Image: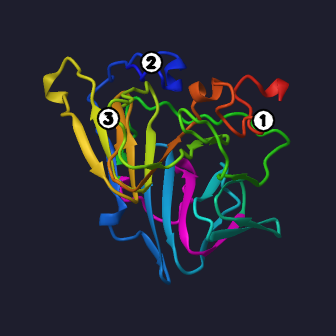
C-alpha cells in the first residue's frame, strides 16, 4: 500500500497485508467528548480507552489530582503533558522529581506516586497486562476476548544504565517529513507528531497496513476522518464495510491489523493526532534518526553494543 513517493515513509520495508486468520475485527472509536468521564477529582475529569496491550488515559486537568503505581507493577508507564501549563511530581523511593509541561516521562517499573497540577491536557499510558490503570476503559467490552492477529507484547531490552525516571522535551524539531517526534520505552512507542493547521492535502494521503500490531491514534486537537478498508476473506459474510469515521477531540481510535487505513485532518484550525504503538515499531526504529531517544533504549539484538 504505497505512500506518496515524496513521503519519507516510502523508504520503509514494503508491507504486504496478509489476510486475517478469521473474521476481520473493526476499529474501535472512543469519542470521549460524547462520554461521561471514568473518574473525577474536583473539577478534573479523566477518560480511558484501550487497545490489546495498552490503557490510555486522557485527563482534562483543572484541579490537582494524581495516581499511585503499586510495587507489583512490572512494566514502564508514562505521563505525556502536551501543554506548558501542566506539571507533575513523581515520587520514587522517597525522592520527588518535579517535571514541567511539554514533556514525555517514562516511569520505571515498581512503586511510584504521581501528582498532577496546573491546567491543560495530560495523557497517561499503562500496559493492559499490568492492571494498574486508575479507571475503566470506555471500550473495555471490545477487548473481552483477545483480538486476533495482534502479536503478543514482548518487552524490548532494558534501557542503557538500567530503569530510572526519564523525561524528554516535546518542544524539539524532530523530523520534517514525515513530521514525527518519536520516543520509545521497553513496551510502547509514542509518535508525538507535529500539529498541522488546516485540512490535509487530499492529494497526499497515505493508505497503508500493519501486519500484526494495532495503531492507537489519539486526537487532542481538531477533527480527523479515519478512512479504513478491511481485508476480504473467502467468507462473504465476514466482510466489513469501508469506514470513513469522523472523530473530534479528544478521542482515541484503535486500528486493527491488517486494515488499510489513513487519517485525514479536516478542521480549519489546529489538528493534532498522536500515534501510539505497543510494542515499539521495529520499522520506525530501523530508520536512522527517527527515534529521538534511541540511545537510551536499544532494539532487540543491540543490547551487546549499547
Check the image and report above or below for 68 versus 108. Answer: below
Asked if the residues shown at circle 1 and circle 2 are in contact, with their CB atoms under 8 angstroms apart, the answer is no
Q: What stretch is highlighted in magenta?
A: 112-140
Q: Where is residue 108 in the image (x, y as percent from the top left)?
A: 73, 52
Distance, label 2 to label 3, CA atoms, is 22 Å
**Left or right placement of residue 125 versus residue 218 in this view:** right
Quarter of the view holding residue 242: top left
Check the image and report above or below for 34 versus 106. Answer: below
- Disc sitting over residue 202 in the figure: 3
Mark 2 surroundings: few (<14), some (14-19) or many (≥20) residues within 10 A: few
Distance, label 1 to label 2, CA atoms, is 27 Å
Residue under label 1: 295
Asked if the residues shown at circle 1 and circle 3 are in contact, with their CB atoms under 8 angstroms apart, the answer is no
**Left or right placement of residue 138 versus residue 109 in this view:** left
* Residue 151 is at least partly visible in this image: yes
Q: In which quarter of the image is the C terminus?
A: top right
Q: What element carries label 2?
A: loop
* Residue 108 is at least partly visible in this image: no
Compare marks 1 and 3 and give the one earlier in the sequence: 3
Compare marks 1 and 2 and give the one earlier in the sequence: 2
At a point 68% along the width and 57% down the height, the residue shown is 72
Q: Position of residue 227 (x, y in %)?
A: 29, 37
Nearer to the camera, 297 or 206 = 206
- Residue located farthest toward the left when viewing the structure as drawn: 237
Quarter of the view holding residue 20: top left
Residue under label 2: 15
- Disc sitting over residue 70 in the figure: none
Nearer to the camera, 109 or 291 = 291
At a point 40% along the width and 19% down the height, the residue shown is 2
At a point 64% along the width and 32% down the height, the residue shown is 290
Closer mark to the observer between disc 1 and disc 3: 3
Q: Position of residue 293 (x, y in %)?
A: 72, 40
Amino acid at each position: 500500500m504505497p505512500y506518496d513517493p515524496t513521503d519519507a515513509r516510502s523508504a520503509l520495508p514494503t508491507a504486504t497485508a496478509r489476510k486475517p486468520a478469521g473474521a476481520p475485527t473493526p476499529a474501535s472509536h472512543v469519542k470521549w467528548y460524547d462520554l461521561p468521564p471514568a473518574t473525577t477529582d474536583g473539577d478534573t475529569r479523566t477518560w480511558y480507552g484501550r487497545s490489546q496491550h495498552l490503557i490510555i488515559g486522557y485527563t482534562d486537568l483543572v484541579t490537582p489530582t494524581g495516581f499511585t503505581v503499586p510495587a507489583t507493577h512490572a512494566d514502564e508507564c508514562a505521563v505525556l503533558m502536551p501543554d506548558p501549563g501542566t506539571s507533575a511530581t513523581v515520587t520514587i523511593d522517597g525522592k520527588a522529581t518535579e517535571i514541567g509541561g511539554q514533556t514525555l516521562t517514562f516511569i520505571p517499573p515498581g512503586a511510584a506516586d504521581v501528582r498532577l497540577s496546573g491546567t491543560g491536557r495530560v495523557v497517561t499510558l499503562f500496559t493492559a497486562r499490568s492492571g494498574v490503570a486508575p479507571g475503566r476503559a470506555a471500550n473495555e467490552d471490545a477487548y473481552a476476548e483477545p483480538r486476533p492477529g495482534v502479536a503478543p507484547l514482548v518487552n524490548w531490552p532494558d534501557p542503557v544504565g538500567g530503569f530510572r525516571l526519564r523525561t524528554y522535551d516535546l518542544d524539539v524539531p524532530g523530523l520534517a517529513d514525515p513530521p514525527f517526534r518519536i520516543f520509545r520505552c521497553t513496551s510502547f512507542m509514542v509518535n508525538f507528531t507535529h500539529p498541522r493547521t488546516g485540512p490535509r492535502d487530499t492529494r497526499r494521503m497515505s493508505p497503508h497496513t500493519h501486519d500484526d500490531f494495532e495503531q492507537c491514534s489519539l486526537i487532542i486537537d481538531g477533527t480527523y476522518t479515519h478512512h479504513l478498508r478491511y481485508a476480504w476473506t473467502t467468507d462473504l459474510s465476514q466482510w466489513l464495510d469501508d469506514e470513513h469515521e469522523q472523530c473530534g477531540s479528544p478521542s482515541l481510535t484503535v486500528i486493527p491489523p491488517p486494515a488499510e487505513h489513513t487519517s485525514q485532518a479536516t478542521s480549519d484550525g489546529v489538528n493534532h493526532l498522536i500515534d501510539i504503538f505497543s510494542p515499539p515499531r521495529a520499522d520506525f526504529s530501523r530508520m536512522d534518526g527517527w527515534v529521538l531517544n534511541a540511545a537510551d533504549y536499544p532494539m532487540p539484538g543491540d543490547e551487546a553494543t549499547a
